[in-house]
Image (spheres, rainbow, N blue to C red):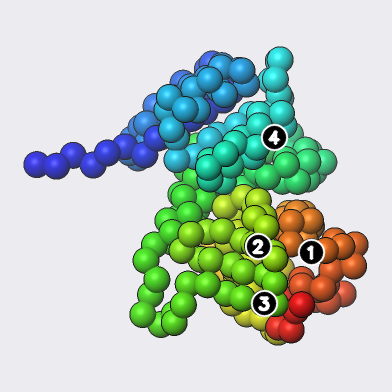
C-alpha cells in the first residue's frame, strides 16, 4: 500500500506555541510542517526542507519577515517563485501592502482560525498545481506572445525582449489570467475569480499591489503602462496590441 507523501511546509514564526498548534492541525490534513523560530534559521532550513510553501511571520526579532521575503525572491534557479503566505499582526493594511509588494502570494492577519490558514494554503498550492499541469487539449500553445512580451505557461517564465522578468507564482497566474483575456475589461472580482484565489475583501487593494509589481517587471515605464491598462472605476484590461 502506497502512503501519500506529506506536502512539505516551512513555518518561520517566533511564537513557539502558535507554531506547535499549526503543525499539529496541518498534520491532520497531510502537511508536514518544519518550524524555524526566526528568520535566520528559516533561511538556513530552506535548502534542507525544500518546502512547497513558506508560512512567514512578518514581525520577528532579528531578520524580520520582510527581509526573509526579499531574500527568498532573490534566490536563483526558479526558487524565487516559492509560494509565500505571510502572517501579519492585527491585519494592518500597510503591512499587507508591504508584504505583497515584496512578493508574498497571500497574507493572513493574526489572530486567525486554523481552518482559514488551511484554506489559504490549499488555494495557493492549487493555483501553483493548476498552472504547472500539462497543457490541456483546448490550448493550442503554452506560449502567449504580445509584441516583445512572451509568457510561457508551461515553464512559468516571462520575458520582455529576451530578458527574464521575475514574478511570484501568484503574480504569474494573475498575468496569465489577464493575458488570456486580452482586450476584455475585467473587474477586480472577475480577476480574483479567474485566478481562483481567496474572495475579495471589502476595500482590499491587494490586486492593485500585485498589478503594480507586474507592471514594474514587464512595462518599459510602469508610470505610463502600455500592457496592463487601468479602466477607472471598473478594473483592468490587458492590451491586445503591444510593441
**Residue 144 drawn above or below residue 111:** below
From the image, tell me which residue sits under label 4. Answer: 70
Does residue 153 appear left or right of residue 145 in this picture?
Answer: left
- In the image, what residue occupies the spot 62% across and 50% down? 168
What distance separates the C-alpha of mark 4 from that of mark 2? Answer: 24 Å
Camera sees residue 35: yes
- Which x, y percent locates residue 42? 55, 22
**Residue 2 drawn above or below residue 27:** below
From the image, tell me which residue sits under label 2. Answer: 162
Q: Nearer the viewer, mark 2 or mark 3?
A: 2
From the image, tell me which residue sits under label 3. Answer: 146
Q: Nearer the viewer, residue 112 or 2?
A: 2
Q: Nearer the viewer, mark 1 or mark 2?
A: 2
Outermost residue toward the right in this view? 223
Say the numbered circle drawn on residue 130: none
Determine which quarter of the picture holds residue 242: bottom right
What crowding class fits label 2: few (fewer than 14 Cα within 10 Å), some (14-19), or many (20 or more)?
few
Q: Nearer the viewer, residue 112 or 195?
A: 195
From the image, tell me which residue sits under label 1. Answer: 219
Which quarter of the rendering shows the N terminus? top left
What SS does tag 4 mark?
helix
Q: Nearer the viewer, mark 1 or mark 4?
A: 1
Q: Nearer the viewer, residue 159 or 173?
A: 159
Q: Earlier in the sequence, mark 1 or mark 2?
A: 2
Amino acid at each position: 500500500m502506497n502512503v501519500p507523501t506529506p506536502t512539505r511546509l516551512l513555518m518561520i514564526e517566533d511564537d513557539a506555541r502558535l507554531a506547535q498548534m499549526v503543525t499539529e492541525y496541518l498534520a491532520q490534513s497531510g502537511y508536514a510542517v518544519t518550524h524555524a523560530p526566526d528568520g535566520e534559521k528559516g533561511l538556513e532550513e530552506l535548502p534542507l526542507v525544500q518546502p512547497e510553501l513558506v508560512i512567514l511571520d512578518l514581525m520577528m526579532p532579528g531578520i524580520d519577515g520582510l527581509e526573509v521575503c526579499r531574500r527568498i525572491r532573490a534566490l536563483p534557479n526558479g526558487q524565487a517563485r516559492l509560494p509565500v503566505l505571510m502572517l501579519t499582526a492585527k491585519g494592518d493594511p500597510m503591512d499587507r501592502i508591504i508584504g505583497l509588494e515584496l512578493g508574498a502570494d497571500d497574507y493572513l492577519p493574526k489572530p486567525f482560525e486554523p481552518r482559514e490558514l488551511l484554506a489559504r494554503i490549499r488555494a495557493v498550492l492549487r493555483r501553483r498545481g493548476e498552472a504547472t499541469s500539462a497543457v490541456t487539449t483546448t490550448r493550442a500553445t503554452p506560449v502567449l506572445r504580445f509584441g516583445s512580451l512572451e509568457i510561457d505557461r508551461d515553464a512559468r517564465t516571462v520575458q520582455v525582449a529576451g530578458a527574464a522578468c521575475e514574478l511570484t507564482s501568484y503574480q504569474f497566474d494573475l498575468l496569465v489570467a489577464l493575458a488570456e483575456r486580452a482586450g476584455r475589461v475585467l473587474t477586480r472580482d472577475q480577476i480574483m475569480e479567474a485566478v481562483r484565489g481567496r474572495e475579495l475583501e471589502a476595500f482590499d487593494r491587494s490586486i492593485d499591489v500585485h498589478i503594480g509589481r507586474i507592471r514594474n517587471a514587464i512595462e518599459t515605464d510602469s508610470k505610463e503602462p502600455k500592457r496592463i491598462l487601468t479602466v477607472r472605476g471598473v478594473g483592468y484590461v490587458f492590451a491586445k496590441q503591444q510593441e
